[in-house]
Image (tube, coloured by chain):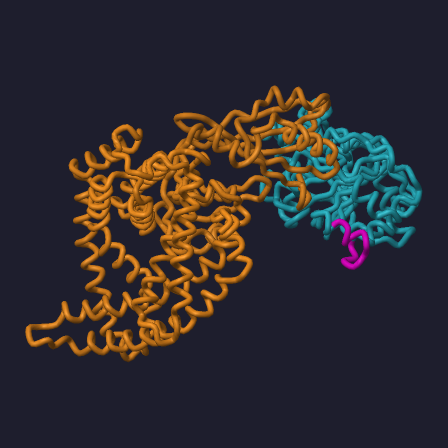
Amino acid sequence: MKIIACYSNKGGVGKTATSVNLAYAYAQAGQQVLLCDLDPQGAAGFYFRVKPSKKLTDARFFEDVQRFVKAIRASDFEGLDVLPANLSFRDFDVFLSRMRNKRSRLKKALVAAGSDYDVIILDCPPNFSTLSENIFKVADEIVVPVIPTTLSERTFDQLVSFFDEHKLRKKKLRAFFSMVQKRKVLHQETMKSMRKLYPKRFLQTTVPFASDIEKMGQHRAPVSTYAGRSTACAAYRTLFDELEDGVVKTQ
Amino acid sequence: MMTEPSGDQFVLIKPIDATKLAKALAGFSVEIAPEVAAKPFVLLDCHDQSLRASGRVLIETNGVLQLWQNKRKPLSQRGKGLGLFVQNLPHGPVQVALKGFPELRALIQIGAGKIAVKSLVVLDELQKTQVRGTIWFMTSSTGQAAIVRIQKLRGYERAYQKVCDAISDLPSGALGTEAFFAGLFPGMFTYQAKPEIRLGQTEPSIEVAADIIQTYLKVARQNEDGVIADIDTEFLHDYRVSLRKIRSVVSLFKGVFSQTQTAELKRVFSELMAPTGRMRDLDVYLLDKDMYFNLVPSKLHAGLHEMFDRFQKERMQEMSRLSRRLRGDAYDTSMSELIALFSETTRLEAGPNADRGASEYACALIWKRYRKVCRTARSITDDTPDETVHDLRIDCKKLRYLMEFFGPLFDAKSFRTIIRPLKKLQDNLGLFNDYSVQQEALLAFVSQQSNAQGRVDAQVGLAVGGLIAVLDQRQKAERSRVISSFQQFDRLETRHLFRSLFHQKEE
């Protein structure tokens, strides 16, 4: 099982759009996917029309396997389930490591319920906290959308420093440029300088600034379900390819 | 989308109406996607619809067999089924599930139509899918039906339960295999080898006889096409059983018809049966082929192969003769005339017993026959000649026929109690007779195959000799069991039951 965290310490960078579209891409590739909406704003659930669960604010939640299993909702798409927001995250890292452990009660309960997930995608809240630190430890890959602007450059520097200070494995950081506007000179120059500064941290794929992505809020569905031929759709598919195979097949 | 293993229901129903379903599901909207191109299907079952009787629906579409059953997961496999026996279907889940289906019955087309698959979704106010499903719409030239699959989605168990409840709350007669058949093939005729015949306690005996004869003439006619098409051997078997029942009514209901008409009817029905006798014998030999090969050592198999090849050839000749006869106008006319003759009693010549009330007449006949069976059986010792045992067999058979004809007039439970040991006795006597008849038939076969000097092919001679030796041993073994089988039948309890059912007068 693979855990992919979508994280950014800055808001409004297209993080939830990335989680949703990546989750959909993994499911389309035949994997069993669980998308966990850890962002209190609950946008990932919103995009799948899944209502947030009211019952799951209890701090002891992660000790209660049955309640956890019950909170999972099927999306409208084959192989893709959603764990809605409104969770309490105190023991989230415990929960994640339990999901990895084949003999844990949590894992057994999931398997019994027919959900032996291949991929777990975490839509993380945009801050530094115990939760984010725990996620950095437990995730296999941390996908970080970065808008190529000066401000984003600073927040990315902070993230890398955080990894250094806490002796976390920087190899996990898989940043990519998000909401890219090719005609903007600033975007072009920032991308160039950041790739130079962090040659191993950035993926080749870039996701453009596109109205099709903004429209996700209207359609409440992944981009490729309503704009299958758009450049935005192609960009997320490429992001998936690069994350999975290390190579860019399209784009 | 993830479904729980148990969250998958399949229901056979009359056509489903989306608007009605939506009405039953307040707060949800129901969408049924437009159909993809409909494919032709063939509904398979055997002549007596054993599959339907067991609640199953077997269809063939584009070389794929699908087996449906209400509330069960459907099974499918590649392969064709039309005209095949279940044991000869290609191996697969459908074939495995059909184990226990009559081995002597071939699958025939009992209906056809078109099948279209549509998707069903139940949405909440956010247009989020809460329940997913599939509908297989089936149409025939006379009606329509559907099979609905409802899938539970993780986290939406309540909506799933609501949809299941809404479907099971559909008006009665809308759910299940019979509703499915009633919708798709309304008024479809179901063949019954033993139709229920209603008798009145005081109904004149001549009417009882006419009812039974009329019923079985129709049963016989329903088997003609199957015999002609040579679909399976059960058609001819049922055909013969029907005619034999009729002949028994004619001969056992003494004094119901005039003497001349009785004699005439006996002749007519014997003539109807005669051309089928050899064919049935050959069918039985061929069906028992493996059994015969197992009876003798493989050293003698060469002769058996030879013998069965000849049986096969002879069967082909008999088959073409019989089917020509059944297709002929003369045969058709005589059957139609017989049905007309027995459709009302006015054209029948009444004998002295014609007006006796059914119940009273039945008691007299059964009691008399029962006493005869007991008399003969009690006289049998180990030294009694085989002839007497044969007589006992025939009397038992007559007793059984009488009890079956008049069965509807008597208490079903008591009847079962006395028929069970009678059946055992009959099985025993039947085997005794079969082994004896088979030996005679084998001897006849050899003499027919021998040349002018009475010599026969050595291989055939060896094989037949071996068989006769084994069959004779078996016949002797059955013979030795007759006395004890009768004792099982002749218990005090059975005697009391016979007396109370058929001989209530104090002696």
Looking at this view, name the residue that lies furthest to the left. B452
Dominant secondary structure, magenta: helix
Q: Residue at x 77, y 53 (%)?
A: A107
| Total numbered circles | 0
Residue depicted at 27% across the width and 41% down the height: B224
The magenta stretch spans residue A156 = no
Q: Can you see residue A225?
A: yes
Query: Can you give x and y, in whole percent of width and height, for residue A185 in the image?
Result: 73, 29
Q: Is residue A216 left or right of residue A231?
A: right
Across and down, in percent, residue B115 comes to 45, 32
The residue closer to the viewer here, B367 or B456, is: B367
User: Does the image show residue A238?
Assistant: no
Q: Which stretch is magenta?
A: A100-110
Quadrant, the N terminus of chain B: top right
Q: Answer with left or right where residue B490 lies relative to residue B192.
A: right
Q: Quadrant of residue A188?
A: top right
Residue at the image point whose x is 56% and y is 39% from the top: B70
Hue used for the chain lettered B? orange
Q: Which chain is cyan?
A: A
Percent coordinates x, y for residue B445 in the rendering: 19, 67
